[in-house]
Image (spheres, rainbow, N blue to C red):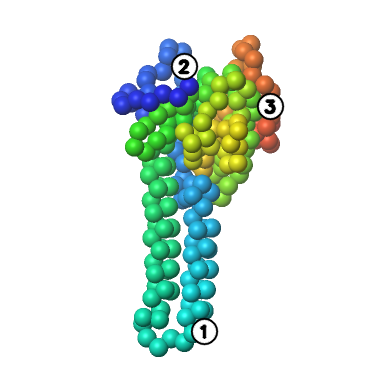
Amino acid sequence: MITEYESEPVPGLPGRLPKGETIIWQGSPNWRVLARTAFHTRVVAAYFAALTVFAAGNAAWHGVSGAADLSGVAITLAAGVIGVALLHLLAWATARSTIYTLTDRRIVLRIGIALPKCINLPLGIIGNVDLRQRMAGTGDLAIKLNSEQRLGYVALWPHARPWHYSEPQPMMRAVPDISTVATLLARACMSIQTNGRVVPIETATRLGAVAEQAVAA
């Protein structure tokens, strides 16, 4: 299910598609949304802002007679700026190295900054999909598998559903135009059912109203 590779004949895939398989959609995370939701840049920024205010208040309480008395404030502020900047850089690199692919047979997650790897998720092993709307038309798709094979949380992160450690769930994070992608996924799952392969109906219906519209279309 997890494949490591060096060459990429098709962007986002470790090899060429088998005959008869078609790419429906490809995309990458919105790095700004990924920074906020996966790397929690706003929380980290708020934390360091609080520390800076505390340091400034403490300095004022004891009296400020020179620049040396504000060194603690400057160090705290600098640490916060550098920390948040590094998290944004990591989010940008993660998004740049990630390609999500939906075909008429599977979902492929190409992830990894230093060592690319692909995670193949055939539509037939998807139990259900949870949709979470985010800002700017983006969203997350958490995928629960119905197979006995399990994926490691560390190997998936940050493309893993938070707090699901015992049964990690792959997640397509900060997907742009999430309504369109959810509709395409719902239709692909329903098409698999129509062709006689067993796919739980929750795969489509758990996508919510978007999936219902796709099924009715």
> Are the two marked residues, 2 and 3, in contact with CB atoms closer than 8 angstroms?
no
Left or right, 204 with respect to 37, comes to right
SS assignment at label 3:
helix
Q: Nearer the viewer, residue 138 or 158?
A: 158
Q: Which residue is mark 3?
A: 202
Kindly identify the amino acid type of the residue bearing the numbered disc 3. Glu
In the drawing, what numbered circle is on residue 21? 2
> Are the two marked residues, 3 and 1, in contact with CB atoms closer than 8 angstroms?
no
Kindly identify the amino acid type of the residue bearing the numbered disc 1. Trp
Instruction: Residue at 36%, 29% (x, y): give it.
Output: 11
Left or right, 71 with respect to 152, comes to left
With respect to residue 101, does 63 lie above or below? below
Q: Nearer the viewer, residue 121 or 64?
A: 64
Can residue 217 be seen here? The reply is no
With respect to residue 97, does 201 lie above or below? above
Instruction: Residue at 51%, 31% (x, y): give it.
Output: 152
**Front tag of 2 and 1:** 1
In the drawing, what numbered circle is on residue 61? 1
